Image: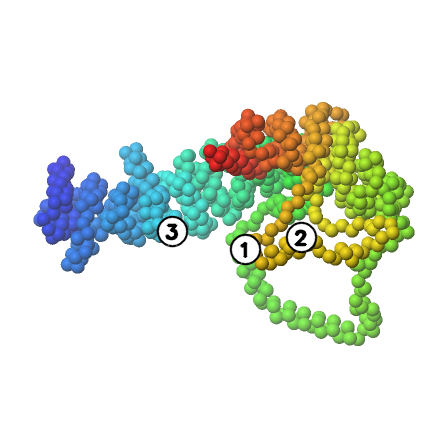
Amino acid sequence: MMNVLRNKMRIYVKETENILRNPKSIDEVTICVEEFYKITLGHEQSVNLRFEDVCFIREVFLSEFYPILLNTFIETLQVEWFTNPEHKHMSEIFDKTFLVGDAAGAFTVLVRCIDNLEASFRLNKCVSLLEKFLDNRGLFQIIQTACKSAPDNSLDFVWEDLISLIATLPDKTANKLQFQNSEKFYPQHYIPLLCKETMDVLRNMHQRLSNNSNNSNIHLEFISRLIGKVCISGHAVILWGSLVPSLEREVRKDYIWCRITERIVTGVPDRCLECSLTALLSQLPWYGLVEKFIGGSVMNKQKIQYLLCTKLLFHRHSQEILLLQSIIGYLGTSHTRKSLFVKAMRDLLSVWGDSSAVRHTSVEQHLYITKALFIALGFLKESDKAEIREDFIQLLMPGIQCHIGSSDHQIRKIGMALAETISAALDPKGQQLKFEFPRDDEVEFLVSLTTPPEDPGLQTLTSEMSEVHINTEADEENSTEMQTKKESEDDLHTDPELDSDDDLVPYDMSNDTKFTKVKQPKYIRDCMEGLISVDDPNRLEVCLGVTEALIRRNPDGLLEIAEEFAKILIHLSDRYSTNDFVPHRFRSLVALTVHAPEQVSKYLTTQFYERNYNLAQRMDILEVLGAAAQELSQPAESRPTEKAAPPGKTASRDSDSTTEDWREIVKQRIESKTRRFGKGTRKELVATKNKFASVAGCFFYPLMANYDRKENTFDLMGEDSLVLARLVYTLGVIIYAAINTPAVKQMADRLLEFLWVIRFHTDVSVRHAVLFAVSMVILSVPGHILLTDLQCEVMETKRWLEDVVEKDVNAESKKLAIQSLVLLENVIKQEFTKGADLT
């Protein structure tokens, strides 16, 4: 019987296709559309009594033949069917055929037609039909129909295709329609609509379960797979942003909703689980809701356990603090998950204190792990502290040493903050760790993470109750305040003791000059004697304040005593907490190096590698050399200088000097009679000698002489990497100061050779300094020299920079490498442009 009906159906479909492809009139098309519409509805009186029992064959027709005829309707669509007012009824029926039949079949046909058709009337009609389909709750019908049947292998391919079309509809329409796209297909409109229809289907299922109906089995696999596909398509944030508020209200009051939500979330395919779960945990407003959404799945599903306990904590980092609070709060608030919580916290502390991990991970990733530890401390119970105290202290100690020795200021700061907090939490009655570091807003925020967040739902309720309570007592408080104010005013007028000098304005003494009995030295040697005086702090302060000015006067005999003077300044220590000691000492050393560059630079570069110097003094030497090199390389400013008058003459100008030269008079007259167009202000450039060119080698080469020598108190290539970073930075500054000098090519060659040894240093500050020095080489050396004499070195450096951009974990390193590559690319383009112009 069924075979006979299928044969009749095939004959009907074939005849309808022939009529639509070769219609004799529009009336004939109208009859075909009406007959198709009645069969779709299951109308018992079908046209021409083609089928005896239309209701019986409707299900077979919709599943097998309905999409075929819909596709034929689109292929044979003509503008004339809709432009004639006499065929208005036919146009209405045509639209309804896409809305009353199989929703999945109609949706599939419309989306595929939009994807395949070119710009035409047919494409516009399909877009219009798809908009009506969405408005007519077509997605609700698709999801509800799919959830009525249990998953079957025969339906797997059909489901996969349908789910892909639903999830990727915004992308398909955007690619096809571009600027003509409908707003209903935008993700911010389409995804919330999909979530609304999904929630309606879930409410129907919940109603069936609550009523204890006979058919109480529900199937949620389609919804789980659909959510996973939408999330992996890039719309996870919008999806969960729309679903979480609705699901949150339901799971807070009903256990059945918790079971439904858990089945949906944990039923997402494994390939989509990471992006789905990450977005969900970032959207949940409180960690207490995580258990209502995923239940105890972390204990029985390995994929979820791996994501929550390993990947989302160690292999990824996010700016969303809710993600960490949701994961750690979920693990730490149940005794069944206690073992996972303690293990995750131990692993976090182990990675946090690993020196290799600190050096080879980005600051953002390390800060993420630090935040996780702060949050975990808030969920650590008192009963657990005694068990883990010794183990955690052993992990904490090497971590403290690692962080204190880091060259990154932020790493040191957050390391000391966490060490103090952990020691206080594990052993509040024992001896506490205390460090000196700036307790800024970042530290305060990290410490605040140890307090678990409260339920925002309870906070809202409490705030509302507080407002009511405040309003009821407002009058009483106001009356009390007014009474107190009145009494205080009465006391003020009656108390005679208040009539004092407290209301007098204090005298402004901010501009007062500090007087001292010590006279300012006028000669260099007197200044040197004052600096080495150990018993007179006032004299030391006065001498240090005028040292720079005395040096910059460039007195006679400065070159002979420059080395001795530099020795005094380098070894000078702030024994008496002198005001502005550091800047005065630094500027004095820079001025001395500028006015006696050869003598002072040789002394400083030699002393840099000598023993009996602390790291601060070595850093000061590098700072001084860099600043002096920059000052020497700058042209002298053209300022009027007053010269002393020779003996026997006054400093005033003679009367004859007021007479202008005749050539100047002629030039002015010519200029006044000459008319010029587009003439701007001309500034005559005066050629000046680069004072740094002759001494650049004295600054540069000695600094690279003994960098690999390991001394008892100074290990430049080992633990003293902070000084190495400053050394490389100073070399970059020096070579940039030597720009346009004959020695810059040889200096660049030596510097690139030196940088090649340390380019893969484990300390990120050294890598940053290397990248800075490379950029200085590119800026300082002429382009033709880079591409000829230094071609091999430059090409190797270019490949290394590309590796840094691709593989380095530090974001700042990638940024510096990109900047260097851009500089190098600009140099290459300029050189090729010059070559093309010459040819």
Q: Amino acid at mark 2?
A: Arg
The percent position of residue 280, horizontal first and vertical second, equals 46, 43
The Cα atoms of the two marked residues, 3 and 2, are separated by: 81 Å
Along the line of sight, which residue is nearer the eye, 417 or 29?
Answer: 29
Q: Earlier in the sequence, mark 2 or mark 1?
A: 2
Reading the image, the residue beneath label 1 is 676
Which mark, residue 189?
Answer: 3
Q: Looking at the image, which residue is at 74% across and 57% down?
A: 658
Reading the image, the residue beneath label 2 is 663
Q: Looking at the image, which residue is at 60% across and 51% down?
A: 682
Q: Earlier in the sequence, mark 3 or mark 2?
A: 3
Helix, strand or loop status at disc 3: helix
The image quadrant of residue 625 is top right
The percent position of residue 87, horizontal first and vertical second, equals 16, 56
Q: Is residue 426 left or right of residue 802?
A: right
How dense is the environment of label 1, judged by Cα within 10 Å: few (below 14), some, or many (20 and up)? few
Which mark, residue 10?
Answer: none
